[in-house]
């Protein structure tokens, strides 16, 4: 007989994960552990599952992962019996068929149900591209990414988890999204939508800038602080500083 239920929210990225994590951290009747988190997600979980590669080791050590993972599991075990327990990491959306049973074994003794949040695939890919250009200086143009992901489907990820966990697929754009979350977790969930993402015009501007410079590879021409100021100006959150040329041209 398995023990209490734990909900494992595995993503997807750019499908309202940050807003959901913020809502879960504030919801009454929900235990959303503080241990093992980087920002809103429980980053220690995918790093414990896959290990820390050379790139990630610039910020997170094996020791950090082990300590935080142990603290996360302790916090889960200590959760009030009346609360729903929810753990979240959108990086788990890329779980492979080989990793899924390992993940299940990590929660031995718990009845684990997986939650996947989706949106229309075209909107997902578009948002993913804008995010990648802004944060990671992504080189491919949107049309190229669309071609490369032409066979993408949320159902493929669902099929990877399904042999090991019950899977709930929710649509973030559905009118009953909050109601379904609340019913699933047994607590009122109010999801905000403050994270509007990167404007398409800004992503296009950043890529155009690099093409005009003849860049063979896409590399940052602007530091993050400058890009954030550009995004804030486009959103009307601040007025960009300008030095107008106001003398006669002719």
Image (cartoon, rainbow, N blue to C red):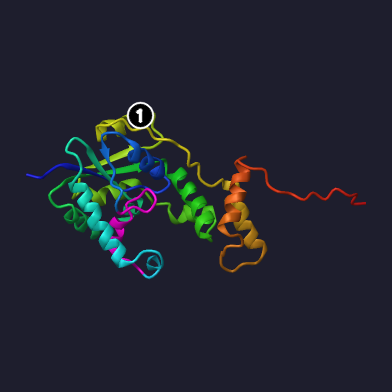
Q: Position of residue 98 (x, y in %)?
A: 23, 60
Residue lying farthest right?
A: 250
| Quarter of the rendering occupied by the N terminus | top left
Residue 26 relative to residue 134: left or right:
left
Residue 223 relative to residue 84: left or right:
right
Q: Is residue 97 visible?
A: no
Q: Which residue is more in the foreground, 25 or 197?
A: 25
- Residue 173 found in image quarter: top left
Task: Residue under label 1, please give it.
Answer: 176
Q: Position of residue 133 (x, y in %)?
A: 53, 56
Q: Secondary structure at mark 1?
A: loop
Q: Which region of the structure is painted magenta? A: 36-53
Q: Position of residue 213 (x, y in %)?
A: 66, 65
Q: Position of residue 58 (x, y in %)?
A: 41, 67
Please name the residue shown 56% across and 67% down the image.
217
Please name the residue shown 18% across and 35% down the image.
82
Task: Decide whether residue 219 is among the magenta residues.
Answer: no
Q: Is residue 141 above or below residue 84?
A: below
Task: Decide whether residue 50 is among the magenta residues.
Answer: yes
């Amino acid at each position: 007989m398995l023990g209490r239920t734990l909900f494992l929210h595995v993503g997807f990225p750019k499908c309202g994960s940050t807003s959901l994590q913020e809502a879960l951290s504030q919801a009454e009747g929900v235990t959303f552990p503080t241990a093992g988190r980087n920002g809103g997600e429980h980053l220690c979980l995918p790093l414990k599952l896959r290990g820390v590669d050379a790139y990630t080791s610039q910020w997170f050590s094996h020791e950090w992962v082990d300590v935080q993972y142990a603290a996360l599991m302790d916090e889960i075990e200590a959760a009030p019996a009346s609360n729903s327990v929810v753990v979240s990491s959108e990086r788990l959306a890329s779980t492979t068929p080989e990793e899924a049973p390992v993940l299940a074994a990590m929660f031995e003794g718990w009845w684990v149900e997986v939650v996947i949040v989706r949106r229309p695939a075209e909107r997902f890919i578009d948002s993913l591209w804008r995010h990648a250009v802004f944060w990671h200086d992504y080189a491919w143009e949107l049309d190229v990414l669309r071609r490369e992901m032409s066979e993408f489907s949320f159902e493929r990820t669902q099929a990877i988890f399904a042999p090991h966990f019950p899977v709930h697929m929710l649509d973030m754009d559905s009118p009953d999204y909050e109601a379904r979350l609340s019913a699933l977790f047994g607590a009122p969930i109010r999801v905000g939508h403050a994270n509007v993402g990167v404007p398409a015009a800004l992503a296009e501007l950043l890529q155009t800038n690099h093409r005009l410079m003849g860049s063979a590879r896409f590399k940052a021409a602007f530091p993050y602080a400058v890009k954030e100021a550009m995004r804030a100006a486009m959103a009307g959150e601040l007025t960009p500083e300008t030095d107008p040329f106001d003398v006669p041209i002719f």
